[in-house]
Amino acid sequence: MLSIFSAVDPVAFEIGNLSVRWYGIVIVAGMIIGLLYACRQAQVIKLSIDDAIELFLWVVPLAVVFARLLYVFVRPSDYFAPELWEDFGKGFLNMIAVWEGGLTIIGGILGGILGGIFFTIRHRKTINFGNVADLVIVPLLTGQIVGRLGNFFNQEAFGIPIDNPRLQTFPFAVYIDTPSGVGEEHWDIVADAIEKGGGGYWFAATFFYEMVWNTIGLAICYAFWKKGSTKKYPGLLLIFYLFWYALGRAWIDAIRMDGKVITQIACGIVAPLALLVMVAYVLLRNSQLSYRRIRELSESGNLQGAQLTVYDIKNYQRIGKFMANEKNPLRLFYGYKKQYIEINFDELDYYHVPKDYKKIFKNSKNEEYILQK
């Protein structure tokens, strides 16, 4: 078992003076898998394969650049110490040496979002940012899952020492003998453990924990996508992703040897905030769609005989209280700058649809109900 999960040579092969590292191969593989998925699913949001490739060219380069920049900037002693820049060329090369490892997904998310915004601006007449973000989330999680394998080859992103002999095996732990990316505050712990193990030791396989966590998130996001939930709630997958990923990183980073306190704090704030935003968004979106539907039915003269729920009626009456105020900014969210249409539902014949019943039957003036499960 030890021979299988001991560190592999990070260099896959060499072509002349060029060394091709496993980390780069894994990252590229994750990108290609994500691109293939995006090309296949692009038609769902009415994009072509060419559009998906263009989106890829916006998102991926910016994600990589920002992922590296954020990784470097939170480690000033490793990349900006004066002695490292005595030779500008070597200092700069060290800073951009992404092929040796060192990407932070939080920076990648920021860069990817920026790329998605640029793409949306270019195609603003045919697509919205929410749909673009939803298309990208599954490829993003796929890339993260595959990309974490690169941490194994580079012997990085591992966790605390595992002293229990029964847990000193994969997938609980990974054998490390040439660690990289370890923060100064944790280096003594790592060095002492490796010395105690005679040149190597078992550490928590936190990169694998994150792979499993992201796989669960991927399954949830894909289920939402296939169910069509994103058509009704564009951008929902992005919000869910921020919640799920931040929640996972909050506890995984707490036991990683390269974990940063600032990352834990940020994730501890983002996770509950994203959850609240997600719940609020779904509730507001339901209200918006219900209000707009009744408004459109009224404008087209098709409200008589329409299928309405108790929620539809009460929501329209509730929203009408502030829609009647032409200065209320929420009017824009509900899609109307026009004068509010007051509707007397008691004077209408409509199909009442109770939530607990699947089949609907006509009632007059909401007085009698004929219901069947």
Image: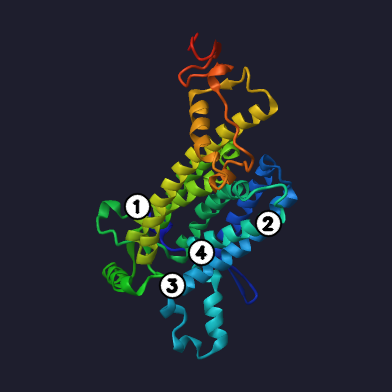
Determine contact: label 3, label 2, CB under 8 Å: no
Of callouts 3 and 1, which one flags the residue occurring earlier in the amino acid sequence?
A: 3
* CA distance for labels 3 and 2: 31 Å
- How many C-alpha atoms fall within 10 Å of the one at disc 3: few (<14), some, or many (≥20)? few
Q: Which numbered circle lies on residue 121?
A: 2
- How many C-alpha atoms fall within 10 Å of the one at disc 4: few (<14), some, or many (≥20)? many
Name the residue that disc number 1 marks: 172
Name the residue that disc number 4 marks: 107
- How many C-alpha atoms fall within 10 Å of the one at disc 1: few (<14), some, or many (≥20)? some
The mark closer to the camera, 1 or 4, is 4
Image coordinates of residue 191 in percent, x first then y, are 31, 72
* CA distance for labels 1 and 2: 45 Å
Q: Amino acid at mark 3?
A: Val
Determine contact: label 3, label 1, CB under 8 Å: no
Q: Amino acid at mark 1?
A: Phe
Name the residue that disc number 3 marks: 74
Image coordinates of residue 24 in percent, x first then y, are 57, 64
- Residue 188 seen in the current view: yes
Q: Secondary structure at mark 3?
A: loop
Image coordinates of residue 257 in percent, x first then y, are 35, 65
* CA distance for labels 1 and 4: 28 Å
Q: Amino acid at mark 2?
A: Ile
Question: Quick one: 15 or 233, which is closer to the camera?
Answer: 233
